[in-house]
Amino acid sequence: MAVTVLLFAGLDASAQRIKLNINYGVGIPASANFKDYVSNTSFRGWNANLLYDVNDQLAVGLGIGSQSFYQRYPRAVYKTVEGSDISAEMTNTVTAMPIMVQGQFNLLPEATVQPYVGLGVGGNLILYNQYLGEFGDSRSKFGFAARPEAGVYIPVGRYKESSIVIGGAYNYLPFKEDNLKNLNNIGIHAGFKFPLR
Amino acid sequence: MLTLALVGCSKDPLRDMTEEESRIYITNRDSSADFHTFKTFSISDSVSVISNNQLEGRESTPLDQLYVNAIKKQMTDRGYTLVARDAKPDLGINVSRLYNTSTGVISYPDYWGGYYDYYDPYYWGYPGYGYNFPGSYGVYQITEGALSVDILDIKDANESKTINGLWNGLIRGSGVFISSAAASNVKALFDQSSYISAN
């Protein structure tokens, strides 16, 4: 009986050390070239990570996400080559989908509001489109991604196993294709983290 | 499924796009041409109909007349004088309706997938039954229409033994062949071509 209890306690504790964090995300274009393409803040984003608590401060795992940027410009005349002009409403879209290895470090694991810092490194799938009127040109490319972040956990619930998460990050997304260079953006996220059982 | 989840938040650029917003106006000019040296023009009242790069014939529908009249107005507003074709005009203008049809193949089972959009078979009086769609393919066609205006150098044709194209205007998108849009479409072409002026 005692061994069974200990084994069960061990399994239960292991499961609680794996936590899923799902956040709603906002993205703000940061690099100059990106802002020339799309300057509007994106309110269409989310990110999630599955982290294993190595100890009460350090957690490592995998993270994914998506942030979609969109901007439509009023009708204007664009010169293409000498003697050729196009009048159109231009629409630019960029969707960044990072997939990365992540780590987070809880600075004050016993506090009511627990600040944390983190870093993610991996790849980034970019889908980008430019439409002139209803005529679009869609392209995709895979590149590097890095994401330093900081925020707070606010433990909630009876056993304080789950947390509200609020934070910010700098998404470093080097990119070079056509006239689009670097998709660096500032991310703000808020969500919930809970143990998997 | 993962890809769908990842891109699910993106905004569709074509959604909520009006016909006017969908349209693009493309102009190409011979950069060496000086439009101030031309004073008269002629334009046919009938329009060429070109389908998949083949000339189908010439027509003069009410819509065609609206486009022709709009071009006449733009040219006369810019100082050119309309003359008959046999009066040796400096410029000749052709108007064409272009149609391009593209064909695709769709697999019906792939398209419909599960029948979650359909009523449960109980609705039809057959509880417990399932739906079945034969493994068939369908062919679809999409036809895009565009309107093209060409300004030709008639004045110098005899000397060069060639009728040179000086300018082309192309209108593409939704609502090109709507009567109410004819005048504004032509105006848009000429608005971005301020070099077309007899003065």
Image (cartoon, coloured by chain):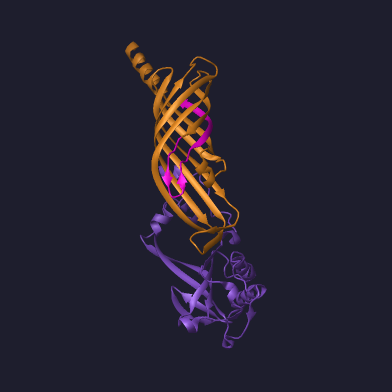
Chain colours: A orange, B purple
Q: Can residue A133 be seen in this view?
A: no
**Residue at 50% of width from left, 75% of height from top?**
B165
- Report the number of discs: 0
Judge whether A180 appears above or below A169 on screen: below
Q: Position of residue B189 (x, y in %)?
A: 59, 67
What is the magenta range? Answer: A172-195
Q: Image quadrant of residue B5?
A: top left
Where does residue A125 sit, x and y in percent of width and height? 41, 42
User: Which residue is outermost to the top?
Assistant: A2
Residue A185 magenta-drawn?
yes
Q: Which of B128 and A87 is in front in this view?
A: A87
What percent of the width, then of the height, locates residue B125? Answer: 48, 55
Q: Residue furthest left?
A: A3
The residue that appears at 55% across and 19% down in the rendered structure is A113
Of residue A69 and residue A23, the one placed in the foreground of this image is A69
Quadrant position of the C terminus of chain A in the picture: top left
Which one is nearer the viewer's eye here, A66 or A36? A36
Asked if residue A131 can be seen in this view, the reply is yes
Residue at far right of view: B77
